[in-house]
Image (cartoon, helix red, strand yellow):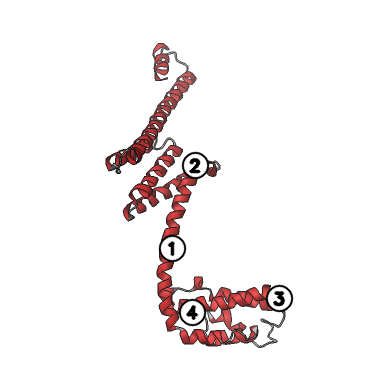
């Protein structure tokens, strides 16, 4: 294709060359350059796949030299089309991330894999297509989700260990709360706001709910009570508590109070 373009430019006298023809030839020349880079990049991707398969399947033990060669091929593919083809870059980065997660598996490579996967999702946003029709996109999305789930699981386990300590420290408070399980909704609201005021929220937000049975805010109708209970669930919800300001012990207390309030709200809904 390059030969055709160059021949045309050579044989048409430049002095008389139509500007439109000249522009078309230059456009074709650029298109040929891009297509050549894409072909080389796709070839590098295929070579990387072959090398990786040989590294992981063709030997009794993992051949790390071949694994690194495969990753280099994927990197080369991405470099060849940088600024020219987003999809090939995304495929290359997804392949690299897969190697880091499936072959190396250590923390450093997991972090690097996460960076590559985030880049894939960011770049894919520039493609105006239904991305879920592409295997590389669904693979990248799933790998990133798995990494996030893994981190979340570790954090939850760590927090649950902390919670056990705070639950033991809150035995008296939680016993008082449990003793109010059979109280009416109105009595429970008065109790929880008096005994455990939500200090993490402005008093003007909740003091109006410290009510009697006929209070116009709470009222004694089912509809009004559901609204009030839902509001209190929102007020006490741990997502609204800053542990670094009010402490993790207080956060756990709000978690337990939110459970009680949510249970009552669900009873009202039912």
Lower sequence index among marks 2 and 3: 2
Indicate the secondary structure of the residue bearing disc 2: helix
Residue 135 is tagged as: 2
Quadrant of the drawing holding the N terminus: top left
Lower sequence index among marks 1 and 2: 2
Indicate the secondary structure of the residue bearing disc 1: helix
Q: Is the residue marked by circle 4 packed among few (<14), some (14-19), or many (20+) residues within 10 Å? A: many
Q: Is the residue marked by circle 3 packed among few (<14), some (14-19), or many (20+) residues within 10 Å? A: few
Whether residues under marks 4 and 2 lie with C-beta atoms below 8 angstroms apart, the answer is no
Q: Which residue is mark 3?
A: 223
> Going 58% across and 75% down the picture, which residue do you hit?
233
Outermost residue on the left side: it is 65
- Distance of mark 2 from mark 3, alpha carbons? 49 Å
Lower sequence index among marks 3 and 1: 1
Residue 48 is situated, as x and y percent measured from the top left of the image, at: 36, 36
Quadrant of the drawing holding the C terminus: bottom right
């Amino acid at each position: 294709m390059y030969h055709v373009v160059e021949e045309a430019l050579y044989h048409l006298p430049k002095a008389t060359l139509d500007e439109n023809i000249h522009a078309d030839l230059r456009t074709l020349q650029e298109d040929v350059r891009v297509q050549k880079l894409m072909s080389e990049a796709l070839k590098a991707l295929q070579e990387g796949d072959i090398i990786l398969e040989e590294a992981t399947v063709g030997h009794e033990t993992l051949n790390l030299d071949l694994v690194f060669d495969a990753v280099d091929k994927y990197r080369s593919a991405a470099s060849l089309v940088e600024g020219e083809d987003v999809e090939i870059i995304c495929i290359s980065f997804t392949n690299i991330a897969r190697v880091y997660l499936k072959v190396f598996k250590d923390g450093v490579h997991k972090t690097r894999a996460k960076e590559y996967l985030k880049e894939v999702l960011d770049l894919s946003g520039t493609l105006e297509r239904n991305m879920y029709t592409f295997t590389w996109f669904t693979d990248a999305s799933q790998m990133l989700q798995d990494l996030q789930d893994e981190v979340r699981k570790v954090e939850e386990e760590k927090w649950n260990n902390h919670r056990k300590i705070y639950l033991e420290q809150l035995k008296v408070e939680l016993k008082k709360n449990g003793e109010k399980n059979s109280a009416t909704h109105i009595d429970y609201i008065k109790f929880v706001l008096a005994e455990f005021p939500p200090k993490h929220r402005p008093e003007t937000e909740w003091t109006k709910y410290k009510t009697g049975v006929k209070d116009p805010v709470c009222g004694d109708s089912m509809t009004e009570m559901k609204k009030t209970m839902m509001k209190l669930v929102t007020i006490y919800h741990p997502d609204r508590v800053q542990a670094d300001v009010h402490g993790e012990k207080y956060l756990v207390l709000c978690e337990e109070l939110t459970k009680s309030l949510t249970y009552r709200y669900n009873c009202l809904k039912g």
